[in-house]
Amino acid sequence: MSIHCGNKFVCHNVFRSLFMATTKPSIQRRKLSTSVVEHVKNSTLATEATSTNSIASDTIAMKTARCKQMHEYSQRLKAYALTFKKRDQGQLDALAIIEEMKQKGFQPTSQNYLQLLMGISLQRHRTHKQNRRMELWFEEFLRLELLKRNPWPKLKKAVMAMSFKGHPNMKAMFLKLDSVHTVQDSECWNAAIMGCVKDMQLLDAEELLKLAQDRNLANSESYQILIDVYLFLQNQPSASRIFSLMLKHNVAADFRIFESFIAYYMSLPANNDNYRTLDRLWQAVLLTSTDNIPNDMIFKLLSYYGLHGELSSGEQVYLDVKSRQQRLNRKCLGQLNKIIIGFCNKRQLPSALSLMYDLIGQGYNPSSRVLCKIIEACIDMDDREAAEQLVHTIQEVDPEAKLAQQCFDALHAQD
């Protein structure tokens, strides 16, 4: 029994020692394997992260390089666009850059094409080939700009630029724009009309005017563009036809339109019919203008009437201006003085004296030359009293007034 138990104890110890000998290394190997796996896993993740960061850095660098190159292309195109006005080579250089961009995978932007449009729009006397080039650039610009959320500001800018020197196909280009982005801007319609006029496409301009009328977008400037060009071409019937069309559509004529007609009739040979037409146009100016009449118009009318001996009409211009509490500037006053001298030369003393007294009453300084002319005319007409009364009035109004000695010499010439 004891031997059996002792053997049992010994066997227990042996099994224990064997168990411990076999299990401990096994545990160590599992711990070692786990550490290796973790290490490998971490190394892999680190490598992947490094690789990802490297790829991201390369992508950013590549994008930065492309942005920089695109900016350089844009700057070169802009620089060439500034040369379009004077030489064709700049346009050819710009075309070469556009082609190079496309070959290298760069898409020219709507802004690039807008710059080219603005550059070529300044060129005078374009050839057919250059006009076609401008049209193609407009089409590319339009296609790209319409992709944007708010294309209108640049679309309008393009139309305004193209109207500067005009284009043979201005009407077609504008209507193409209008078909894809309805134009409800009167200023833009007027620019399109002007673009037709600048290239002398007058029928196209009238067609655009009619379309603007149909949309209630035509204003006084729309009509004035055509009136001005017809008057410039000495085609008064067509100008009058456009003017009648304007009144028919209840568009009020403003000062500028009457000014254009006045300038036209002044350029014609002087005759009674033209004098009366000018009188009516002047009255129309007074009725339609609430602001001061420009001194330039007053000067031209006074000069015209004085030159052609229509002194009463010149006098009426002054009286109309005075009734509006508007004062004459120095140039206009000089022309009015010539009209007074004209009355003196014709011995129309009442008109000459009336104008002179009116000027004194309005605070204008009398011209010694004009005063002498009036005195001489009074003496010639045996009306010394009128001459003396005029001198006395001037001295009474302004005791410090210095009258030229020649005025007194004229007054006492026959004493």
Image (spheres, rainbow, N blue to C red):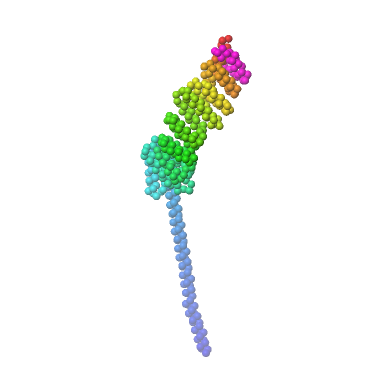
* Magenta span of residues: 378-404
Give the left or right position of residue 364, taking residue 152 as reference. Answer: right
Above or below, 106 against 217 in this view is: below
Q: Do we see residue 298 in this rendering?
A: yes
Percent position of residue 279, x then y: 51, 26
Count of labels in the image? 0
**Residue placed most toward the observer, 367 or 312:** 312
**Magenta: predominant secondary structure element?**
helix
Percent position of residue 392, x then y: 61, 16
**Residue placed most toward the observer, 211 or 397:** 211
Percent position of residue 250, x then y: 51, 36
Which residue is pictured at 50% across the width and 80% down the height? 16
Which residue is outermost to the bottom?
A: 1
Answer whether residue 400 is magenta in the image: yes
Above or below, 33 against 304 in this view is: below
**Residue placed most toward the observer, 60 or 136:** 136
Answer whether residue 323 is magenta in the image: no
Which residue is pictured at 56% across the width and 27% down the height? 321
Would you identify the image quadrant in which residue 232 lies? top left
Above or below, 351 against 86 in this view is: above
Percent position of residue 177, x then y: 44, 43
**Residue placed most toward the observer, 305 or 341:** 305
Above or below, 352 against 182 in this view is: above
Q: Do we see residue 293 in this rendering?
A: no
Question: Which image quarter is the C terminus in?
Answer: top right
Which residue is outermost to the top?
A: 415
